Image (cartoon, rainbow, N blue to C red):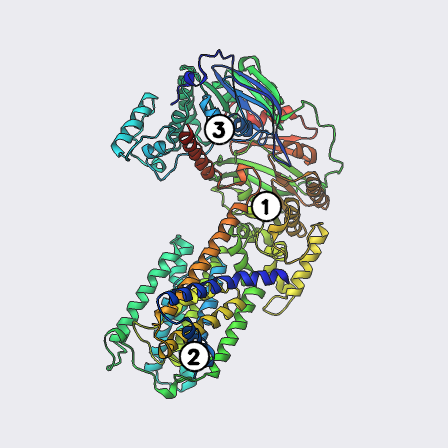
Amino acid sequence: MNQHLARLITRLAPVVIAFALAFVLFAATGFSAGSVASGIVEGVFTGRGATTNTIRWSIPLILIGLGIAVSLRAGEFNIGAQGQFLVGSLAAIWVALKWDLPKPWLIFFAIVLAVVAGALWSAIAGVLKVYLGADEVITTLMLNFVAIQLVQWVATGPLRDPFSSGDAASTERLDPSMRVQGSGEYSLELILLTIAVIVAAWSLLERSRLGIAVQLIGANPKAAAWQGLSIRGTQLHTYLIAGGLAGLTGATEVFGPAGRVVTGSTPALGFTALVVATVGSLAVVGTVAAGLFFGGLQAAILYLPIVSDLPPSGLRIIEGLVALLITAQLATALRRRRSTQSPLPDKALNGNQPIEEGIQHVLSRRSRDETG
Amino acid sequence: MLGVEDAVGGLPRTAAVRCSGVTVDFGSVLAVDDVNLTLPVGGIHALVGQNGAGKTTLARAIAGLQQHTSGTVQVNGVEVPPGANLVARRSGVDMVHQHPSLIPELTVAEALELGSPSPRRGPFLRGAIERRWSEFLESRGVDVDVRRRVKELSVELVQSVEIARANPGRGGLLLLDEPTAVLAPSRVEALFEQLRAMVATEVTILIVLHKLSEVRNIADTVTVLREGRLVLSPTPAAATTDAEVGAHIVGEDLADPSPRSRLRVVGSDDEVAIAASGIDAQAVAGESPLNNLSLDVARGEIVGVAGVEGNGQRTLVETLVGLRLPMSGAIRFLGVDCTTKSVEGRRAIGVRSVPFDRNAEGTAAELPLWQNVLGWEAQRFRRWDRLPFLSAAAMRRRATERLQRFHVAYADIDQPVASLSGGNTQRLILARELPDARALVVAQPTRGLDISGITGVWQALAELAASGVPILVVSSDLDELLEHSDRVDVIRGGTIVASHPRPFYRSAIGYDMVGAVGP
């Protein structure tokens, strides 16, 4: 029990520190820390429509974050969720605007196509990584830009809303009767869908053959190979899952709160979701909790300018600090793991030895020079 | 680089190195045990022994890179306190490590300048530095463009640069740790030429070697370490035979008096349970490729594979397990052709394996015990549970059974493997691999374990063999192979050069391991 408590504290520490640092910054630059704090509380919990907004932003972050968590658990640094989300959105809006079907069928096909589109977009990077060894950080990141340009093209071309323009060019809006949620409303359907996905993700990761393989491969791919696990196959699956969930989120946004696909100024859900999954320590429960936290933060970011003179970027600082501190925490954990990997003084067991020996050698020469 | 005469004044020197009672204690192992060694000034002195005999550790102790726990080391008459690399270097010792220590990303000139005992003062002037090191290397007979990056150079060129750099100059001592291990056979002679040229300038060389043919070729004297102890003091190489040196390396020249108490399960005698024939395979880094390798193991038989490390052991095991496919030849397990089967395909017919490195390859350190002990088997858990999802209770139950059966000491089935000792980790791997094994390939089963751990591992293997399972064990510990195997195959240069039945003659096996003539 104590151990769990210690883990929880370690997990929450970056968040607390980030808030503390941000408030020091706010106070130092002349904003009233008290009014910012009360503004945040109102934006997340107590203000008008605050909980609705918190849930509204939590849903996409959780959905995308769960997919990213699966991917990272397998050791695949798929940071292309934003692009996969956008491609899913495009698939959904295309079905919604161009297909002529009754609402349930329309939503069904839109979801299927959005999932497939996101999964395939992700699979491009997956295939490049698994079969050709292309670094997935680069390919997934670059595919984000391709997706952004695709949105730009669709929103200013084929599906253009004639009344939008410039930075905020967008596609036509969905007919309100086709949506499951108007702005500023709850959507029970979306909440139920999210809960279903959470349960499915937990079962997949903790209680399925694929999940066991994902965990083993992520923890030690060499051991997984010796035990005959299909490393390529498993890794490809994680690309499909991550992309599929991001694509699904595209559909929920189109039929839910967004109602259209906008270029430019939308919050980059795919990137925030990456932070969500990491803060949630790549576990399902953690990711859900982190999703709620960052959903609340997003709601507060949009609410704060109404009650305080703090610009929205002020709270983005908190988001950035959390991401930075988590990364720092992970880096030390990684280094510790590497240094404890082989405790034997046997060079055959220690892959780092040549480098360490080399450094030691150089240092000994240096120190001699300094002392003599 | 260094004027040794200046450092030691005009003192008369009778010995380049004098070690008395040098001991290096790693806690669980005595790596070097009470070694008294005196090397005369001048000449090339070979230091040989099995893996883990303490050769590298002794050399490092002499160079002040490894703290000795007791005894004294004198270099050129100056005592080197434990770990005092500076003192050793001032006394004119330098060491070339087995792995290159020049930083690969830098140019040769930059890398040499970075490690120089007397770097250029003042601003960094590329031209001046390049001129300096280019002249330096030229004066030592190494022909290389110092503006090229270290990583672009061939292994042998990097090595000759390192040797030139480490060359302590007239009257100094140079230590070389297995310099031939990284070289192709055809390059070895060039290295030896470089060393002979250095000896001509009154440098003393202590060189760690593995092959007796190389000892014959280069060394004036030969010294043998076994299990950390000096078993052959520097002896003129011409006054020894390969067989004598081989016997010193592996131990007493006696037939092993303790045959394995269990009889072989012969059963269907002509059924060869593990069979590799004519295997050619590309080498794992740092090893010989497999070259027309053939071996076989009968049901219930334990066959040990002995050899000097780097002769293809890892390549062999990885090829048998299915991690790499051979270029030619055939592999059969239990009568089934597995030559092109994947690891999973081989496991499906009952092939199991214990990898070389229990931490890096055998387990996932941060995952809980139950996941590690089930591992691959968790893939099959639908057997217990018809639902598409696995039953956590069933998995934990099975994991607990296995851990208890193999006497793994643990507190909580959810604790990470990283919290286990080496012996318990190895037992966990056995608990995963042994229960359903119908054929077993084992690599380094006891490396780094204490006595009770070693006993436990071999007991488990013997029980498995008694039930009719064929077991192939690759180990660099010859003693354990002699004690527990029914047969010992010797691997050298990527092929099985001999197969020794009981009773074993150590010297014969040792002779095959080091080989008088290179492969």
Camera-near label (1 vs 2) is 2
Instruction: Specify the amino acid type for callout 2.
Output: Asn
Q: In this image, A247 relative to B512: left or right?
A: left
The structure residue drawn at horizontal position 53% and vertical position 60%, both measured from the top left corner, is A10
Instruction: Specify the amino acid type for callout 3.
Output: Asn
Q: From the viewer's side, name the closer residue of B15 and B458.
A: B15
Can you see residue B213? yes
Q: From the viewer's side, name the closer residue of B248 and A298.
A: A298
Camera-near label (3 vs 1) is 3
The Cα–Cα distance between marks 2 and 3, rounded to whole angstroms, is 66 Å
Q: Where is residue A305? Give x, y as percent.
A: 35, 76
B41 shown above or below B277? above
B169 shown above or below A194? above
B391 shown above or below B369? below
Q: Residue furthest bottom?
A: A177
Instruction: Specify the amino acid type for callout 1.
Output: Arg
Q: From the viewer's side, name the closer residue of B291 and B174.
A: B174
Which chain is disc 1 placed on? B
Looking at the rendered structure, whether the residues under marks 3 and 1 are on a common chain is answered as: yes
Could you tell me which secondary element the residue under label 3 belongs to? helix
Q: Which residue is mark 3?
A: B85
The answer to which image quadrant residue B197 occupies is top left
Q: Where is residue B319? Give x, y as percent.
A: 53, 43
